[in-house]
Image (cartoon, rainbow, N blue to C red):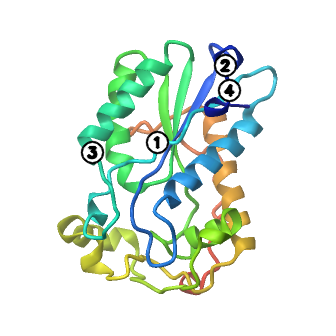
Amino acid sequence: MTELAAEPWPSVPRGGLVLVPTGSTEQHGPHLPFDTDAVIAAEVAQRAAARLEHDGRAVVVAPVLAFGASGEHQDFPGTISIGQEALRFVLVELVRSIANWAQRIVFINGHGGNVPALHRAVQQLVAEGRDAAWAPCGTPGEDAHAGFAETSIMLALRPGSVGPERPVGHLSPIGELMPALEASGVRAVSPTGVLGDASGADAREGDRLLDAMVSSVERRIEAATTDDRGCLRDPTPDPHHGSLTSPAAR
């Protein structure tokens, strides 16, 4: 596995697979840092790349794209969003550039707000003849934002960046919340910015959830089939492997 940011150009293989982590710079409640999505996406990409690099296949991990479409979090100070159209343009130009020396590009996405831009960007890139797709950092049943899943993973990866609070936010499923989130933003639904329950977060659960994410990304990339959004399909999802054990999920 080649971590692009740390290598000189002669070390970069041609014609291989490139994973581009996509995250955000947005509020994650009163206890998690603004780069949570970026940290998780980068870690999943690096671990997946290490597993995928076999039989002589070259896998490169690009630096994380730390700015995304986070307009729903804009009412919280510190959030930086570039919006859907700017993000789409950036994604397209990244692939056009990378395709000069790589064969296949997969975005490893850590922020749900990036999905519309990913969909449109990949659709355009495929129409141009590029081998591009995206895969989510997700597990079945996880809470939406800054709750059990993300707090547990950050406790496993970077415990020093996690604050002492373990807040409980709005617990409704994200599908039920979407109309309100799209109309008024996260703050109108949850004043703390948390959509989920972080009270039972645990580093060991974070390790387990992270492994489930990496395994899913690995399967998706190996299978190489996409849905109508350009998202790589997981051919053998295990609904139990990634399930939550937070109080809200019991």
Residue 65: mark: 1
Residue identifier under label 2: 12
The Cα atoms of the two marked residues, 3 and 2, are separated by 31 Å
Residue identifier under label 4: 7
The Cα atoms of the two marked residues, 1 and 2, are separated by 19 Å
- First in sequence: mark 4 or mark 1? 4
The label nearer to you, 4 versus 1, is: 4
CB atoms of marks 1 and 2 within 8 Å: no
- First in sequence: mark 4 or mark 3? 4
Kindly indicate the quadrant of the structure image that contains residue 199. bottom right
Label 1: element kind? loop
Q: Position of residue 169 (x, y in %)?
A: 42, 83
Observer-nearest residue: 123 or 167? 167
Task: Inspect the image, locate mark 2, and give the three-letter code of the amino acid beneath it.
Answer: Val
CB atoms of marks 2 and 4 within 8 Å: yes
Q: What residue appears at the point 64 percent right and 54 percent down from the top-left corner?
A: 213
CB atoms of marks 4 and 3 within 8 Å: no
The label nearer to you, 3 versus 2, is: 2
The label nearer to you, 3 versus 1, is: 1
The reply, left or right, for residue 100 in relation to residue 112 is right
The Cα atoms of the two marked residues, 3 and 1, are separated by 14 Å
Residue identifier under label 3: 84
The Cα atoms of the two marked residues, 4 and 3, are separated by 31 Å
The label nearer to you, 4 versus 3, is: 4
Q: What is the number of callouts on the image?
A: 4
- First in sequence: mark 3 or mark 2? 2
Label 4: element kind? loop
**Res 27 seen here:** yes
Task: Inspect the image, locate mark 3, and give the three-letter code of the amino acid beneath it.
Answer: Gln
Furthest residue toward right:
55
